[in-house]
Amino acid sequence: MNEPVYSATDFSAPAMVEGIAQVVEVDGKLAWLVPEQTSSCGGCASASACGAKGIGTTASRLEARRFQLVNDAGFRVGERVVVGIRENALLKASITAYVIPLATLLIAGALAQWAAGSDRVTMAAMFAGLALGLGLARLGAGRLLLRGDLAPRFIRRAGAGETCNLE
């Protein structure tokens, strides 16, 4: 008889976006990690204006990128680990941060232009729409954070010389 063929890929599980981070501090049951920069960081045309680098000294930039994980795996300082976040959570966060404020700005501007036909009224309405959108985005991000959707998850320890670059 033919034996069933099983796929090694579980398509029912959400895809993960992976990255490598280094453990910089262990504090009881919590471990603090800093993501490693990929080789593409700093290599694009907008590198000088990139928000991923942060503002200020190297120490303040590293501090701003730190995140914590529950130390169930017994992490040690200096260890490299692979962490991931669900792809759909990343999409939800992007929509929350960018689409909501932009949509409210454009909708408010279009409605004001249609109703009043004045550039000043339209600009004021667009500013109000942006403020409303940023407020809605803040509420949405808070909800995502409370549900734990934005929390990175430990996947495995990184091997020697392992990178997340696709080559």
Image (spheres, grey):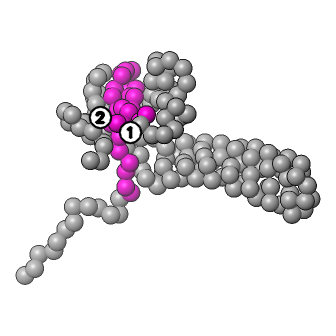
Q: Quadrant of the N terminus?
A: bottom left
Label 1: few (<14), some (14–19) or many (≥20) C-alpha neighbours in 10 Å: few
Query: Mainly helix, strand or loop, the magenta region?
Result: strand
Nearest the camera: 133 or 146? 133
Identify which residue is drawn at 28% across, 30% down.
80
Identify which residue is drawn at 45% across, 28% down.
66
* Residue 75: mark in rendering: none
User: Which residue is tagged 1?
Assistant: 40
* Residue 81: mark in rendering: 2
Which residue ends up furthest to the left in the rendered image? Answer: 1
Instruction: Where is residue 41? Give x, y as percent.
Output: 41, 36
Report the side of 79 relative to 119 (left or right): left
Asked whether 121 falls inside the magenta stretch, the response is no
Q: Secondary structure at mark 1?
A: loop
**Rendering quarter of residue 163:** top left
Looking at numbered disc 2 in the image, what kind of residue is underneath it?
Val
Nearest the camera: 6 or 166? 166
Identify which residue is drawn at 19% across, 33% down.
160
Instruction: Where is residue 131? Give x, y as percent.
Output: 76, 44
The tally of labels here is 2
Report the side of 40 relative to 4 (left or right): right
Which residue ends up furthest to the front in the rendered image? Answer: 45
**Rendering quarter of residue 10:** bottom left
Identify which residue is drawn at 55% across, 49% down.
94
Q: Visible in this render: residue 154?
A: no
Label 2: few (<14), some (14–19) or many (≥20) C-alpha neighbours in 10 Å: many
Q: Secondary structure at mark 2?
A: strand
Looking at numbered disc 1 in the image, what kind of residue is underneath it?
Ser
State the extent of the magenta-drawn residues as a range: 14-42
Distance Cα–Cα, label 2 vs label 1 = 20 Å
Instruction: Where is residue 105? Give x, y as percent.
Output: 74, 52
Instruction: Where is residue 165? Give x, y as percent.
Output: 30, 43
